[in-house]
Image (spheres, rainbow, N blue to C red):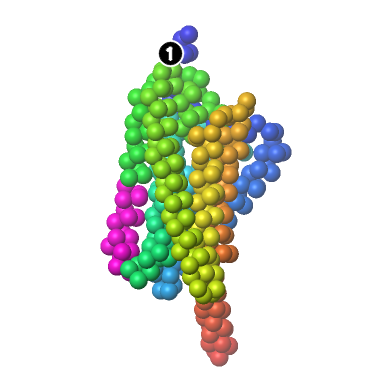
Amino acid sequence: MEENQTMVTEFVLLGFCLGPRIHLVLFLLFSLFYTLTILGNGTILAMICLDSRLHTPMYFFLSHLAIVDMAYACNTVPQTLINLLDETRPITFAGCMTQTFLFLAFAHTECVLLVVMSYDRYVAICHPLHYTVIMNWRVCTILAAVSWIFSFLLALVHLVLILRLPFCGPHEINHFFCEILSVLKLACADTTLNQVVIFAACVFILVAPLCFVLVSYTRILVAILRIQSGEGRRKAFSTCSSHLCVVGLFFGSAIVMYMAPKSQHPEEQQKVLFLFYSFFNPMLNPLIYSLRNAEVKGALKRSLCKESHSWLVWCSDHKSW
């Protein structure tokens, strides 16, 4: 009883209880995923910044998406890697709350950015003559700023509601990072308000935006089918299909995690789903955009050619010495 009355100052993330050898394999595998995520999104971001042909609203928002994906990975993966090597290493209460807040903020930001990118594609295909007027740089800057500010404010609401709760033991979180639902299970008070706000936020930030995206792409599809030129249809499908794949991965996994009925082993199910959400989505996004987008592939080829040309010039200059 006395232990239960002691306020918790740190948590232990249980992670994956699979044995030291499997943990080592997971450490190497997750390290590879983490490296690919940073390199992939960093490459996309660098290409957009350096190639003037990609200085368009579509790639402006894609650069923000790359930043969010890298932030996702940096927020959750390092702690997961540490816990795979040292299961007893705790995370402070402040560190846990910070991780929860940042995860929610970046998740909300990605959701809003995907909706904004859908609107951008809708205007580009359904109203091409007015595209430069509607999606001017002032509008793009405002949309990006609102996406970040709104998302962090919404995450702050969740954080404030968590901080009002007492945590008096146990201190073990059955997850590989401080996910909000797993943290709430440790609160020794009524969390009904938190659960209601989470559900309302899911409807507001997941279901409503997904409906908007589906309506946008329905109208985009109708507009594409009206294009007479086969080359025009192919290009329109190419620019939209990559974004639609990313939307499907993000919204599909998020809705299953927070709105689908729980199985008999909800905690283990959540771990697997969050693996996909936290590790695979940020890693796959740059691959989807680079493999399915001709402009990104063109920018990458130009960058590689420029680097090889610079290397040849450098070598020839040093040979002349």
What span is colored magenta in the figure? Answer: 132-149
Q: Is residue 127 left or right of residue 88?
A: left
The residue positioned 35% from the left and 43% from the top of the image is 152
Residue type at mark 1?
Answer: Gln
Q: Residue furthest top?
A: 1
On the image, which quarter does residue 161 sit in?
top left
Height in image: 86 above or below 38? above
Total labels drawn: 1
Q: Position of residue 16 (x, y in %)?
A: 63, 34
Location of residue 193 (image quadrant)? top left
Q: Is residue 257 among what the camera can see?
A: yes
**196 shown above or below 314:** above
Q: Label 1: which residue?
A: 5
Residue 39: x and y in percent read: 54, 59
Percent position (x, y) of residue 15? 59, 33
* Residue at x 50% of width, y 45% of height: 251
